Image (cartoon, rainbow, N blue to C red):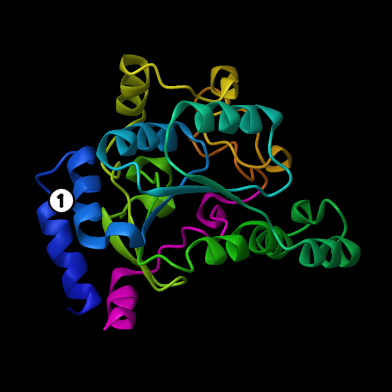
């Protein structure tokens, strides 16, 4: 089936489904060619818990940029011990990191958007491509309410950069729903959330969110909202995405 037609058909089915049912649908469609990318966010911890009840054969992976908070590493360790699924950790290519730092400095990301995207490309985008090498589709924890750039998010989308289907089972959840699930199911989360951190990435590029700020304000706070994507979740216009999928 044409990828665009398959995505449309899956989204039509997903309209009447909850997150667990969406993941079950994804397992039915993609089997062992389905993986889950977790950043250990609140959303991803919810999805990890749901996956544990759906299929323990889904591989879960995370990207260690080399600049994460210690709290994130501690949460990863705790999560690996709690759930029976396979967890894989992908690291950036050491030569690429060394070359980038040698040419642009250790804190290059503060100097320009181009430099920040270069750093994200080396530390996140390239490892993601390796993580997806044997997958046909991948699950992630995106929600429409997370940022302006994600407001048009669909549950099933064509990931143009990686030429795979991307699945967001929590697309229509709000943060209150996420935190309600966490409380009701005793889910472990990053302790930094209790200190005002909502979206947590690299320590150098994340700060707590101030009262009244957007929930993504703590990520790359020196940039404009429309620039705040690292390259993992670029969302081209639907018309472009569909034309490329044909």
Count of marks, rendered view: 1
Tag 1's secondary structure? helix
Question: Measuring 40% from the left and 54% from the top, which residue is drawn there?
Answer: 35
Can you say which quadrant of the picture contains the C terminus? bottom left
Residue 109: % across, % down: 75, 54
Q: Residues within 10 Å of mark 1 (few under 14, many from 20)?
A: many
Looking at the picture, tell me which residue is in the foreground, 96 or 149.
Answer: 96
Question: Measuring 36% from the left and 15% from the top, which residue is drawn there?
Answer: 183
Left/right placement of residue 98 relative to residue 117 reads right
Looking at the picture, tell me which residue is in the foreground, 219 or 7.
Answer: 7
Residue 115: % across, % down: 74, 62
Question: Measuring 47% from the left and 72% from the top, which residue is drawn there?
Answer: 161
Question: Measuring 65% from the left and 37% from the top, which residue is drawn there?
Answer: 206
Can you say which quadrant of the picture contains the N terminus? bottom left
Q: Which residues are magenta?
A: 223-246
Q: Quadrant of residue 52?
A: top left
Left/right placement of residue 128 relative to residue 73 reads left
Residue 70: % across, % down: 70, 30
Looking at the picture, tell me which residue is in the foreground, 69 or 204.
Answer: 69
Residue 88: % across, % down: 55, 48
Q: Is residue 174 visible?
A: yes
**Magenta stretch encompasses residue 244:** yes
Q: Is residue 209 visible?
A: no
**Magenta stretch encompasses residue 234:** yes
Residue position marked by numbered label 1 in the rendering:
14
């Amino acid at each position: 089936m044409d990828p665009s037609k398959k995505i449309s058909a899956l989204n039509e089915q997903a309209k009447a489904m909850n997150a667990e049912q969406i993941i079950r649908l994804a397992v039915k469609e993609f089997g062992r060619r389905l993986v889950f990318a977790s950043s250990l966010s609140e959303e991803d911890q919810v999805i990890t818990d749901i996956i544990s009840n759906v299929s323990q054969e889904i591989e879960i992976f995370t990207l260690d940029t080399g600049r994460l908070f210690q709290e994130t590493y501690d949460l990863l360790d705790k999560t690996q011990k709690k759930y029976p699924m396979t967890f894989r950790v992908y690291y950036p290519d050491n030569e690429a990191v060394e070359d980038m730092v040698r040419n642009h400095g250790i804190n290059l990301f503060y100097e320009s958007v181009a430099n920040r995207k270069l750093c994200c490309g080396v530390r996140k985008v390239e490892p993601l491509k390796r993580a997806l090498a044997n997958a046909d589709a991948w699950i992630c924890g995106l929600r429409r309410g997370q940022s302006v750039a994600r407001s048009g998010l669909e549950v099933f989308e064509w990931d143009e950069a990686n030429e795979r289907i991307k699945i967001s089972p929590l697309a229509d959840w709000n943060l209150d729903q996420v935190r309600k699930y966490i409380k009701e199911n005793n889910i472990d989360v990053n302790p930094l959330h209790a200190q005002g951190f909502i979206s947590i990435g690299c320590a150098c590029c994340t700060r707590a969110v101030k009262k009244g700020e957007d929930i993504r304000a703590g990520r790359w706070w020196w940039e404009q909202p429309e620039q705040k994507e690292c390259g993992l979740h670029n969302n081209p216009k639907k018309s472009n995405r569909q034309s490329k999928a044909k």
